[in-house]
Every structure is written in C-alpha cells, then in structure tokens.
Image (cartoon, grey):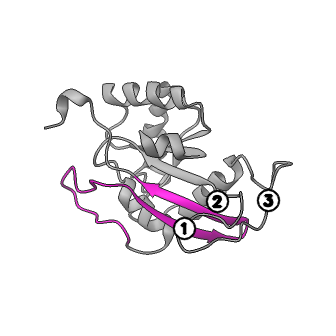
C-alpha cells in the first residue's frame, strides 16, 4: 500500500494463464482509490496464441492488457516504453524534466525525484521476474512458492528518457488470508 502511495505509475501484474480472480477485483478497487496512472500487465503470455485467451482481463476495467512474458523477456522493452509514456513527466508531457541529478539513495539533488513505478498484484503472478527483467539484473529472488518477496525492493533504471525507480512489492492478499 505504501509503494502504491509513493508511486507515480502503478503496474498491475496478472497471471494471464490463470486469468482474473475475485482477489484481483478487490485489488483493482484499491488501485482506483490511488488515482494514479495504471498499466494492466498480463504476464506469462509466451506467444501470440496465448494473447487471445488473455483478453478476458479486459473485464477488470483497467483498459487493454499489456501482454508480456517476463520469463522469456517477450515485450519487456516495449513495456518499459509504455511505462515511460504514462509518467506524469514523460517526454510526451509539457512538464518533462530530462535531468534529475541523482545521488546514490534514489533521491534527486534539489526538489526533483525520479518517477517511481510500483509493480503490484497477487502472489505468484511474476512481479519479481518482471522486475528483474526491467532492471536488467537478478535483484529480486524468484521462486514458484508464494510469499518469496516479503519486502519491497527498489532499483533505479537509467532510460533514454531519464531515470525511473521500479519497486517490486510483495503479493497483495486479503487481510483474512495473512498468517
């Protein structure tokens, strides 16, 4: 929840092979409350044939799903371009600031901070794998057991449009399902 509040863009990751679950509808409600630009990411779409099945994610009401395969790197670069385009200070905006003058703790010198993108979703939808692919190194532990990511991890990524901080979050669950 804190990562969502601090983010400039929210990337809602859903396992396209499983489809939308009731828990995803609850998370979408929380995303709408945040009132931030949100990208619906359909992960685990390994080829074009799987895209037709993933179109059912339109039912979440977040617009067209963005199809990726974090494991295979399919469309990860295109996703990064889409994230940049949705930034409040993107090159497509009049407010674009091309140089943030960053220091090592991910804050800017002066008043400007780099934009932040929070990867949110249920456990085991591929958030950490997608995070590793976007930052270009294995920063987050990836395992098929739910609950591997316990704390948020943030990493600065230099892009041609300026720096962006990606935040990998733990899977969001209903409070009643947390031990």
Q: Are marks 2 and 1 in contact (CB under 8 Å)?
A: yes
- Whether residue 12 is visible here, answered yes or no, is no
Identify which residue is drawn at 43% across, 51% down. Answer: 45
Mark closer to the chain start, 2 or 3: 3
Q: Label 2 to label 3, Cα distance in Å?
A: 10 Å
Name the N-terminal-most of marks 2 and 1.
2
**Where does the N terminus fall, quadrant-wise?**
top left
Judge whether 136 appears above or below 69 on screen.
below
Residue marked by disc 1: 156
Label of residue 100 in the image: none
Which residue, as the protein is rendered here, is positioned at the far left?
179
Residue beneath disc 2? 114
21 or 163, which is in the foreground? 163
The C terminus is located in which quarter?
A: top left
Judged left or right of residue 135, residue 25 is left
What is the crowding at mark 3: few (fewer than 14 residues within 10 Å), some, or many (at least 20)? some
Name which residue lies at 22% across and 50% down: 147
Q: Are marks 1 and 3 in contact (CB under 8 Å)?
A: no
Q: Position of residue 77 (x, y in %)?
A: 59, 64
Residue extending furthest right? Answer: 94
Position above or below: 3 against 128: above
Q: Magenta stretch? A: 139-168
Please name the residue that numbered disc 3 is placed on: 97
Position of residue 44 measured from the top left corner of the image (x, y, whole percent): 39, 52
* Residue 9 at x, y percent in the picture: 59, 45
Whether 13 is among the magenta residues is no
- Percent position of residue 126, x then y: 35, 53
Residue furthest to the front in view is 110
Q: Closer to the camera, 48 or 40?
A: 40
Q: Secondary structure at mark 3?
A: loop
Is residue 166 magenta-colored?
A: yes
């Amino acid at each position: 929840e804190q990562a969502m509040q601090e983010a400039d863009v929210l990337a809602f990751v859903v396992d396209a092979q499983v489809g939308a679950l009731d828990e995803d509808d609850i998370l979408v409600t929380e995303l709408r409350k945040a009132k931030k630009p949100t990208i619906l990411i359909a992960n685990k779409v390994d080829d074009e044939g799987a895209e037709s099945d993933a179109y059912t994610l339109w039912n979440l009401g977040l617009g067209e799903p963005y199809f990726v395969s974090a494991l295979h790197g399919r469309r990860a670069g295109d996703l990064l371009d889409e994230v940049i385009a949705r930034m409040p200070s993107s090159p497509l905006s009049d407010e674009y600031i091309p140089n943030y003058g960053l220091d090592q703790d991910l804050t800017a010198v002066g008043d400007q901070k780099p934009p932040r993108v929070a990867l949110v979703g249920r456990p085991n939808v591929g958030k950490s794998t997608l995070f590793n692919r976007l930052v270009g190194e294995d920063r987050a532990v990836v395992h098929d057991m739910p609950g591997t990511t316990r704390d948020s991890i943030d990493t600065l990524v230099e892009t041609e449009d300026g720096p962006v901080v990606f935040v990998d979050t733990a899977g969001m669950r209903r409070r009643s399902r947390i031990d």
